[in-house]
Image (cartoon, rainbow, N blue to C red):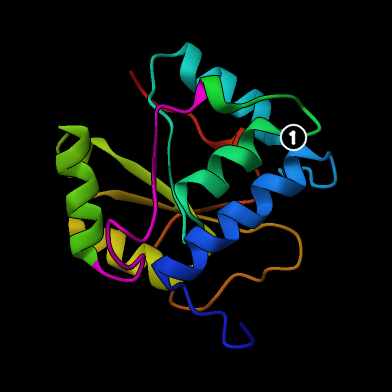
Amino acid sequence: MAQDRKSTGLTALQGKIWERGYQLGELRGEVYPDVLSAFERWAGGGKDICIFSSGSILAQQLLFSNTRYGDLKPLIKRYFDTTTGSKMEAESYRQISAELDAPPSAIAFVSDVVAELDAVKLSGMSTVLCLRPGLTLPENLGHPHIETFDEISFAN
């Protein structure tokens, strides 16, 4: 755990542990205040919201269904985890594109991890670096950046 490995087996176990914590009301999914309004705007505009996380699909669903802003799960179309592949490999994003039956050029990917965005870019998807509080803009970035989801708008 100290090495923060993203082992599929460990993340599946994590999801099961979290499930009990959410059921008991001991855990709450933490999302930034702009997430709900952005998800509602995007979904209302016909955009599909999908999540790719190193956490298991169960853990993602638990987190998004138990936020202080309510249940965000109805706004999310699909979840992907490390069973799809590493977040640092372009092939994982190509696999997501194939599973969504959408060309990579039709998909925008937002992350706070530049190495992930580098892999995303290689897959042909659009990238956006989200600089949340505490993060600084890296030099030689190569990706557009935002500070809140409110800055993201999609042309129809």
Looking at the rendered structure, the number of numbered marks drawn on it comes to 1
Going by the image, does 79 lie left or right of 69?
left
Left or right of 99 in this view: 6: right
**Residue sitting at the far bottom:** 3
Placement of the C terminus among the 4 image quadrants: top left
Left of 74 or right of it: where is 29?
Answer: right
Which quadrant of the figure contains the N terminus?
bottom right
Q: Amino acid at mark 1?
A: Thr
Q: Which residues are magenta?
A: 75-89
77 and 137: which is toward the camera: 77
On the image, the x and y values in percent for residue 70 come to: 74, 24
Residue 87 painted magenta? yes
- Relative to 25, is 85 above or below? below
User: Residue 134 at x, y = what percent?
Assistant: 75, 67
Q: Identify the residue at image location x=51%, y=78%.
A: 139
| Magenta span: chief secondary structure | loop
**Is any part of residue 3 visible from this angle?**
yes
User: Can you identify the residue that label 1 sits on?
Assistant: 67
Mark 1 closeness class: few <14, some 14–19, many ≥20 residues within 10 Å = some
Q: Is residue 75 above or below residue 53?
A: above
53 or 18: nearer the viewer: 18
Residue 18 at x, y percent in the picture? 67, 52
Q: Quadrant of residue 141?
A: bottom left
At 22% from the left edge and 64% from the top edge, which residue is drawn? 90
Please identify the residue farthest to the right as the structure is shown. Answer: 26
Q: Which quadrant of the structure image shows residue 92? A: bottom left
